[in-house]
Amino acid sequence: QVANTPKGKFLALVKSEKVVAQMSASVADNDPSTVRRICALVMNAAIKSPELYNSTHTSVLKVLLDCCALGIEPNGRDAHVLPYKTKNKSTGEQITIAQLMLDYKGMVTLAMRSERISTIRAEVVCENDLFSWSDGTIHHEINFFSDRGKMIGVYAIAKMKDGSMIS
């Protein structure tokens, strides 16, 4: 009786014709293969993190619809589907929700789709790098021939199509 288990209910939700139809309506390219791929990737995420089977149906549906609306696949590179424990606000009981977490690569993908950005790059700052930030201007020097130390931060610089820079 897999159907009555958390896993069975999760799979029934993700494969539901009603859910697939709702997802198809929110996919930008209206391509049914995109919806099938997103559903398969969410099911794969649950195999890797079985706690997702216990997620509320509302949170799983939100993840599916957000992926479609954003045009992002939860493939472990651009985005991840992760279980998150929280308390139900009305009952106080602990519940599990599914959350879509965008990876920086997914954020870059979305930024590049905006058609306002011509280039974007992200950098890691380590404790032995020379780094300064002043009034929006970044100066970062890396000595690749010595130990850079622990990561202490990250930043991104985007060049807009109008020539302006954002950091």
Image (cartoon, helix red, strand yellow):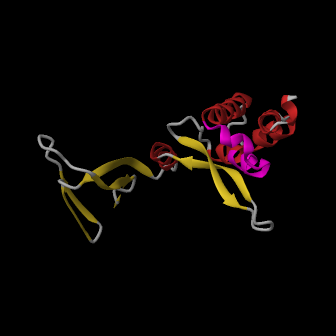
Residue 46 position, x and y percent, is 66, 36
Residue at far bottom of view: 135
The quarter of the displayed image where residue 12 is located: top right
Where residue 102 appears, x then y in whole percent? 53, 48
Instruction: Name the residue at 67% across, 42% down.
Output: 51
Q: Which sits in the foreground, 107 or 40?
A: 40
Is residue 90 placed above or below 100 in the rendered structure? Answer: below
Q: Quadrant of the C terminus?
A: bottom left
Residue 28 in sight: no
Q: Nearer the viewer, residue 58 or 21?
A: 58
Question: In the image, 148: left or right of 76?
Answer: left
Q: Is residue 89 magenta?
A: no
> Across the whole image, how many numbered discs are drawn on residues?
0
Which segment did they paint magenta?
49-63
Q: Is residue 50 visible?
A: yes
Look at 35% across and 49% down and name the residue there: 122
Answer above or below: position of 119 versus 86.
above
